[in-house]
Image: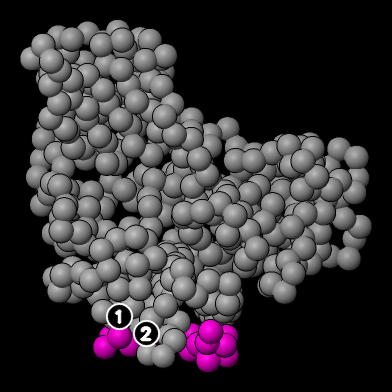
Amino acid sequence: MTSRADIDVRPIDETEFADWNRALNTGFLREPTSAQEIIDARRAQFTPGRSVGAFDGGRCVATFRSFAQELTVVGGATVPADAVSNVTVTATHRRRGLLTRMMAQDLAAAKERGDVVATLIAAEYPIYGRYGFGPATSTTEWTVDVPRAGLDPRWAGPGDGGRVDLVDGEDVRKLGPELHERLRRAQPGAVSRDDLWWKITTGAVRFHATFQEPYYVVYRSAGGEIEGMAAYTADDHWGDAKQPLNTAQVKWLIGVTPAAQRALWRYLCSIDWVVKVKSGRRAPDDLLPLFLPDPRAAAVTTHADWLWVRILDVVRALEARTYEAAGSLVLEVADSGGPAGGRYRLEASADGAGSCVPTTESADLTLDVVELATLWLGDESAVRLAALGRVREERAGAARQADALLRTSRRPWCPDLF
């Protein structure tokens, strides 16, 4: 067995990208060797210094990539984030500290750059807590039984003066970015999308040989403004009695107004031959079920943690967001070996603004940086975490006060996989 010291962990250069991509495919149980056009497409994500590999005898055996991202916090402000992706360790080289070395290098660089947080989508739950990440948003998928939903089968378009139209991928690349900006500025937990994201989602850049072109649909308000957009695919399934039993799978759906959301879901449930609509990843408090005359027709098929956050700068993180009430709280944050440890006084004013400073005052709550991340975007309850022993009250009632300050009326949501 090669010793840990003999395994070289370092940023890759462009000449090593094919080997790095083979290790990435192996870790994710995809066909190891990609076609050259797929490698060339993936190379578009390459940022010097931020794609890292572990090399044993010249072969890449672990991968790690990060990239610049903006994350929307409560109140609509954004913070710079270090988005972590493409994390693999080949099964032949586990338990040698490779992920720990790659993560430590990346988080140190992120802190040095001035990133407020790091983010990731965790493929496996137990891995990332030991690096200070905590689940900050969750996601829910519904499957709508269309015949049961009680919708009018004669639906021919929105009744609010708006309209629904099919468009092509080129239209999506032109119209989608501005619409998404409107969504993410209002949605805590949402993240930025670059031009490459829109090219990938519409097939202009193909990461997979099996890309299936979706259908694209937009909703325009009565005034002609685009307020919603969705991408979906459909299967081709007929029952034994020559009965169409097709399912529409939503890839993504943006609606910046309730009217846009209602119209797009209503359209999806009105497509000929479609008897089921899979919603794709939605906010856990999405309005979809309540748009239906029979909300029970929308059955939850998946509910899970989604965006994980690692706070790098407590002061900037707590000052970036707004608060639901006025008050103050002293937090003792534990961060073993990390940058976020310390005691901080949070002051929230009646207008929702917050200030945060290091302090020597007695703590009201003691918690790990993992739990702070879980509370930061407003989705979790400090009272629940105290009941679980993951937050400790140093002053009676402090957890309830934390909920009054931190929790939000709508839940945070990250629409993206990265």
Q: Which residues are magenta?
A: 1-16
Farthest-out residue, front: 1
Left or right: 139 as drawn, with respect to 204:
right
- Indicate which label's residue lies in the foreground, 1 or 2: 2
**Residue type, label 2:** Arg
Kind of residue sitting beneath label 1: Asp
State yes or no: residue 9 in magenta: yes
- Percent of width and height locating residue 307: 50, 51
What residue sits right under mark 2 in the picture? 59
Q: Earlier in the sequence, mark 1 or mark 2?
A: 1
Residue 282 horizontal side relative to residue 147, left or right = right
Q: Quadrant of residue 86?
A: bottom left
Q: Residue at x 53, y 71 (%)?
A: 94
When asked about the image quadrant of residue 335, the answer is: bottom right
Q: Secondary structure at mark 2?
A: strand
Which residue does the image show at 82% across and 54% down from the upper left? 366
Disc 1 to disc 2: CB gap under 8 Å: yes
Q: Quadrant of residue 30?
A: bottom left
Is 355 located above or below residue 303 in the figure? below
> Residue 402 at x, y = what percent?
75, 43
Identify the disc placed on residue 19: 1
- Along the horizontal axis of the image, is 250 left or right of 388? left
